Each structure stands twice: as C-alpha cells, then as structure tokens.
Amino acid sequence: MGLYRLLTKSIVFSTRSRRRFFTFVIVFSILSGATVLLLGTFDNFSREGMLDHRGVVIRINSGSYLDLASAESTLAIEDGRTTSGASAVIYYKFVDFGTNIRIFSINKNYPWAFVAINPTNLVSGRFPNSPTEILVSSDSILPMGDSEGGVFAFIKPVVGMTFKLGISNASEFDIKVSGVVKIPNTEVTGGRHWIIMPEEAFERLRGPQNLALSDNEIYVHSITFVAQGDILSAFSGQTYNFVDQLADNYDSLGSPYGFPIFKEKTDKDGERNFTILSLIFGLFGTFMVSTLYSYLITRFRRREVAVLKAMGYSKWNVRTVVLTEILVVAVTGFIIGLLAIQLSIYLGRVGSWFYWIILSPTAFFSFLAVVISCVPGFVIITTRTLAVRPIELFRQK
C-alpha cells in the first residue's frame, strides 16, 4: 500500500513544474512521432507503399493478351493461391464488355497492389468496399441504346450513380459508382472505358447467370506477388530477400513461353539502411532526453530521495519513484505523438481506406522502443544519485 501511495504521489509530483513537464512532453511527442513514422516504413501491408517494399509485379506488355488459363499454367500457380516466399499471389483480370467497356477485378485486401490505379489518382469518391460498388475511369462515357435523328445520347458516370450491367435489361447485376479514377498515361486503354470492381463482383459477372466466361476467355492485366514477412522480418531484411527471390524466380518467364512479360521491382536496401540509421539516431535522441529529464528530477528532488532512503526505502523503491515520473512524461508524449500521426493519416485518407496505425504492430513496437530507450539514462543517473548517503544529501543546499 505504501508503494502504491508513493507511486500515486510521484505521478502528481511529475506535474508540479508545469513548464518542465510540458516542455519534455512536447519533446517526447516529437521523438515518438518520428519513431512511429520510421518503424511504419517496415509495416506497409495494405497501404500505398506496399508495392515499393513488398511487391513484385509481372505485367503483360501493352497490346498483348494473356488469358487466365495460360497464365496459371505458365506460373504453375492458380489465382488466389500462394507460393514460396509470397504471402499472396493476386491475378488482376479483365474482360471486354461490348465494344467500349473493359471490366477489371481488384483485390480489396490489397487495394494498392493493382499497378494501374493508385489512391493519388482518385478524382472523386472512394475505392469500392462492397461487391456492388465500382470505380470508373474519368474519361468514361456510356452510350445509351437508342438515338434520335442520328444523334446518339451518352451518359457520363458520376459518384453515386447506380445502373445495371448485364447482357439484357432483365439482368439483376446492379452496381453503384463509388469513385472516379484517372487512368495514368502509361496504361493503354485500347479505346475502351474502364470499370474496376471487387473480385467478388467480377466472379459474379463472369458466372453462368451473366457472361458465362471460362478461364481462357478472361485476360490478365498483371500479377502481383506480395512478399512474406511482418514488421520484424522487414526490419531484419528477410522480407527484402523474399522480394529478390520472387523477382529472380519470375524474371525470365517471358522468354521460354513466348509471352511478353516484364517485371517491376524496386531495390529498397538503401532506403531500409537509411531508415534504420535514422531510427537509431532518433532512439539515441530519446535516450539523451530521458537522461536529461532523469538528471533534472534527481537534482530537484535530492532531499526527497534522501528522506526516502532515511525512512528505510530500498534503492529499488526509490528508483521506482523516479522511473514513474520519467514514464509519465514519456508515455504522455508518446500518446500525443501517436495521436498526431493518426490524425494526419485520417486527414490524408483516400475515400474509405483508412489505416489504424494506433492498432498496428508499428504502434506497439514504437512504444517499446521509446520506453526502453528511457531506461539506460535513468539507470545511469539514479545509480550515481543513490550511491550518495542520505546525510550527504541533507548537507547539500
């Protein structure tokens, strides 16, 4: 009970000097926010940077066609299956509908892994998050099936528009435009307007009740391999080894089979090393700040430390008191820094895709890094202070 009261008082005492308290809270929040951002580079699943860090893309050359059956046979990997070194293998498929529409599939679990689109290319709206929603290209024009006086009527899809997609007016395939995306100039549209829908909707469209298409009637735009690994394996470089392995395994697929395929891969070793170095300097800064704060606490609370020791408190109990004050400031600063990063992610979100960094491994490992980096400075300062006898502390003015 005595220790509990002592800890409670330590928390209260930590705010006695409000200027010092708020100054160090701000410093810790800045250092914590930097730590979160740096560690976040190793945890890029389901985000815009995923392809740069963990993706290997095989894309069909412009103007060429590779059907799904041939692609699966060539890679010896079925759509939706995985392979050594990859946590996911995603086929981005398309089918031509009528004379001017090309319909693509998109994987909702890896929204940024389709190289033809990107969150920054959204003109309005958001990415689809249900089987009944779609993206349309910004230049889409849908002709109506009738004309008057030789002048055709056209419809330009906008966000919120709902229409039927099927082989007849009796089709029950209702879809809603959730967003409009600008297709980059590097993509050849083939004179067709693009509709991009979730995989579930695409499979329903090609099913027997609609288009009734077999695998050799479905074409492949690109295939994305997502390398295995989590934040720790990315930090150690193992994930990047998987990226290299996957790229090497599928580098020469185009030659022996005659399919014009090329890969896209970015070497991230240099960026990874720079991030680790920056992280080390950031944690060193946290260590220096915590050491300075430990020094200030022990300096301004020398007589309190002497009283505690004279009352029979052990060195461990006294250390616990000082450590409590440090952690109050460090944890408060960390929470503020983390919330600031989360707010910036929220404000910069694209449509419905929102990343909860406060619930991710990044937040957990950042918290451990900030707290652990406080310990060495605390130990150094308190060891020196506690080595002095109480009577000597009382004599000091």
Image (cartoon, rainbow, N blue to C red):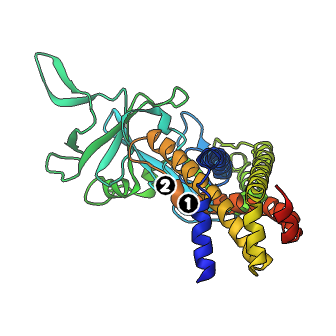
How far across and down, in percent of the image, does residue 319 sit? 75, 70
How far across and down, in percent of the image, does residue 28 sit? 66, 49
How far across and down, in percent of the image, does residue 78 sit? 54, 63
How many marks are shown on the rendered structure?
2
Q: Is residue 273 left or right of residue 162?
A: right
On residue 356, the disc is 2
Answer whether residue 258 is visible to the viewer in this image: no
- The answer to which image quadrant residue 230 occupies is bottom right
Quadrant of the drawing holding the N terminus: bottom right
Mark 1 is on which residue type? Ser
Viewer-nearest residue: 320 or 370: 320
Kindly identify which residue carries mark 1: 360
On residue 224, the disc is none
Mark 2 touches mark 1? (CB < 8 Å): yes
Question: Dot 1, crowdedness within 10 Å: few (<14), some or many (≥20)?
Answer: few
Q: Residue at x 16, y 17 (%)?
A: 151
Q: Is residue 3 left or right of residue 397?
A: left
- The answer to which image quadrant residue 394 occupies is bottom right
Quadrant of the drawing holding the C terminus: bottom right
Measured Cα–Cα span from mark 2 to mark 1:
7 Å
Query: From what the image shows, is residue 3 above or below residue 149?
Result: below
Viewer-nearest residue: 49 or 184: 49
